[in-house]
Amino acid sequence: MTQFTLLAWDYTDDGALERRMGCREEHLKALRELYHQGHFISGGVILDDDGKMIGSNAHFQFEDRAAMDAWLETEPYVRDRVWEHIDIREIKLLDPNA
């Protein structure tokens, strides 16, 4: 399995937060499914200085980048135009038990 980090910044238009909230439960449900499949490691929302949600940061593991990209095509935050800029990089997370 290959590990990846995802850093995604939300759109900044007036409807951006409303779009995020409109598909947030579907997004979280999908992440729970990925967790049970062994693909989602950790993650959460990025907040601005006022506590407003403006992006996401997460760690995943997939067989390869193609599998990560295939999942991303189904992600509600991509489909519903929540994430405007997405940066994905291969990583190697520290195993605290090693």
Image (cartoon, rainbow, N blue to C red):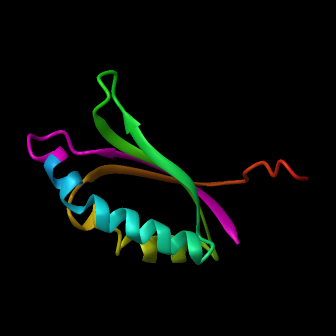
For the point 41% across and 47% down, the residue is: 56
Relative horizontal placement of residue 13, taking residue 25 as reference (left or right): left
Give the image location of residue 10, x and y in percent.
Answer: 28, 45
Relative horizontal placement of residue 98, taking residue 40 as reference (left or right): right
Give the image location of residue 19, x and y in percent.
Answer: 16, 54
84 and 96: which is toward the camera: 96
Q: Which residues are magenta?
A: 1-17
Quarter occupied by residue 71:
bottom left
From what the image shows, is residue 75 above or below residue 47? below
Residue 53 forms part of the magenta stretch? no
Quarter occupied by residue 64:
bottom right
From what the image shows, is residue 70 above or below residue 29? below
Quarter occupied by residue 53:
top left
From what the image shows, is residue 37 above or below residue 15? below
84 and 54: which is toward the camera: 54
Give the image location of residue 46, x and y in percent.
Answer: 40, 38
For the point 56% across and 69% down, the residue is: 35
